[in-house]
Amino acid sequence: MYLLSANGTLRTILVLLIIWQVLRLWMRAQRAKHAAHRPQQPGEPSRPKGDVRIERISETRHGAPPPNAEDADFEVIKDKPEH
């Protein structure tokens, strides 16, 4: 009968929410710990924290469409005018 009562249901929801929040905090702490000890990637230049760099990306050239491609036809359907 414990699980069927309103108080028991609310208590169960509260316990699950608390467990969820504790797990979220633990996962964030683990992620922060791993990020602090992450070795620098070989191609990654070292720069001070907060330094912002804007780089231009070279334009990509798109080739012609394949020769077997077909255009799709469509029809415009208009509503009948009301009298």
Image (cartoon, helix red, strand yellow):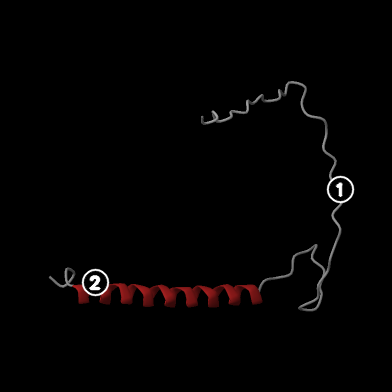
Residue in view at x 78 percent, y 63 percent: 42
- Picture quadrant of residue 20: bottom left
Residue type of the residue flagged with mark 2: Thr
Please state if 68 lies on the left or on the right of 17 as rendered. right
Please state if 60 lies on the left or on the right of 32 as rendered. right
For the residues marked 1 and 2, what is the alpha-carbon distance in whole angstroms? 58 Å
According to the picture, the residue beneath numbered tag 2 turns out to be: 9
The residue furthest front is 83
According to the picture, the residue beneath numbered tag 1 turns out to be: 59
The x, y position of residue 65, in whole percent, is 78, 29
The residue furthest left is 1
Q: How many C-alpha atoms fall within 10 Å of the one at disc 2: few (<14), some, or many (≥20)?
A: few
- Picture quadrant of residue 73: top right
The x, y position of residue 38, in whole percent, is 67, 71
Q: Name the element at disc 2.
A: helix
Could you tell me which quadrant the N terminus lies in? Answer: bottom left
Residue in view at x 73 percent, y 21 percent: 68
